[in-house]
Amino acid sequence: IQWLVNERKCSANYELVALRAFIAAAKFVHGGDEDDVGSGDGLDKPYAKLGLVQQLRKISKETGRRAERESPVADARVKWLDWSQYLGVVDALREECAALDKDGRRRSPSAVAWSVQRYLIFGILSCVPDRQRTVRELEIGRTLFRERVVSGGVESAGEGESRSSASGKAGEYRWVIRHGPDDYKTGRDYGVRPPMVIHPKFYPALEDFVANHRNHLGEPAHGLLFSTRSGAPLRDKDVHRILTSTSYRLTGKRVNPHLVRDMIITHLRGTDASERELEALAIYMGHSLAMQKGTYDRRTKEEKVAPAIDLLDSVNAKMRA
């Protein structure tokens, strides 16, 4: 830890990640010794008797306080988009799904398939701003479902019907993402998530992709919705590359998947959204309201206090009237 801080000049957040890893390693090494582990009953945490873990926890607590006050080390300006700009990228990608290129020549089926997939990835993240794992692990019948909207609730469509183009008017069905505790990072804390609804504007492209385009990406042998150009399942670095390269080409900013969450939360916390709505958003996105405020809200202090200044000006104006 001293080497990281003194020699490498790491940030408090990086130091905190390292400390958590060291604590986990210490627990693993001493996991078989019941005298060291303890029962965790009463006020004592498990491993409280182990001096190494106790000391690392103390350092971690102090480092966590510094991390809360520390400004981000990376320059967000080189990869940050306002939410309206991100939605503009989504609209631009929709136009790129055309079967003909700008010179009127027919594009290859694989090129069109890649464009549609790219549009869907950006589009789904715009209405379900979740971790990139959610996008990578979309699978019809497991995490992705087409549900009929019926009186008093919804019912899932059959497996065969899910894979066909939707019939009926908009609003009679919906595409949703469903997660159990094992399907997302904080599942152990939050359990089964509420259904995450994909916006109807993306249904035509989604259904067309499943029915006509997906198999042109290397004829994938897996059941996941999205693939690499060769047909393999997407890895985390593949999704990262798709977002950064595409956003840079269209905007000059390298937006990574995780920043999408930050951008929408920062945008919404700067609007008139109520505390109730923001709490609902936190539950929807699978994290706490405290994390929403502290980790994902990238507004400066000046931007955060601006409503207070307006409020004081308004009160004073009324008093003088």
Image: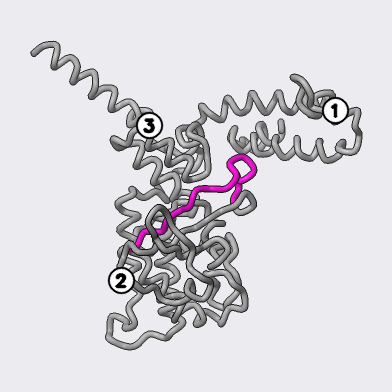
Instruction: Label 3: state its secondary structure.
Output: helix
User: Circle 2 sits on which residue?
Assistant: 95
Q: Mark 2 or 3 closer to N-term?
A: 2
Tell me the quarter of the image containing the C terminus.
top left
Query: Residue lying furthest front in this view?
Result: 151
**Above or below — where is 79 with respect to 244?**
above
Residue type, numbered disc 3: Glu
**Above or below — where is 302 with respect to 259?**
above
Marks 2/1: CA–CA distance: 61 Å
User: Circle 1 sits on which residue?
Assistant: 38
**Above or below — where is 180 with respect to 135?**
above
Label 2 Cα neighbours within 10 Å, binned few <14 / some 14-19 / many ≥20: few
User: Circle 3 sits on which residue?
Assistant: 275
Q: How many marks?
A: 3
Tell whether position 136 is magenta.
no
Residue type, numbered disc 2: Glu
Task: Kindly identify the residue that appears in the image at 49 percent across and 63 percent down.
Answer: 156
Q: Mark 1 or 3 closer to N-term?
A: 1
Tell me the quarter of the picture where residue 203 sits: bottom left
Q: Is residue 151 left or right of residue 186?
A: left
**Which residues are drawn in magenta?**
184-200
Q: Is residue 27 left or right of residue 275?
A: right
Task: Kindly identify the residue that appears in the image at 36 percent across and 71 percent down.
Answer: 204
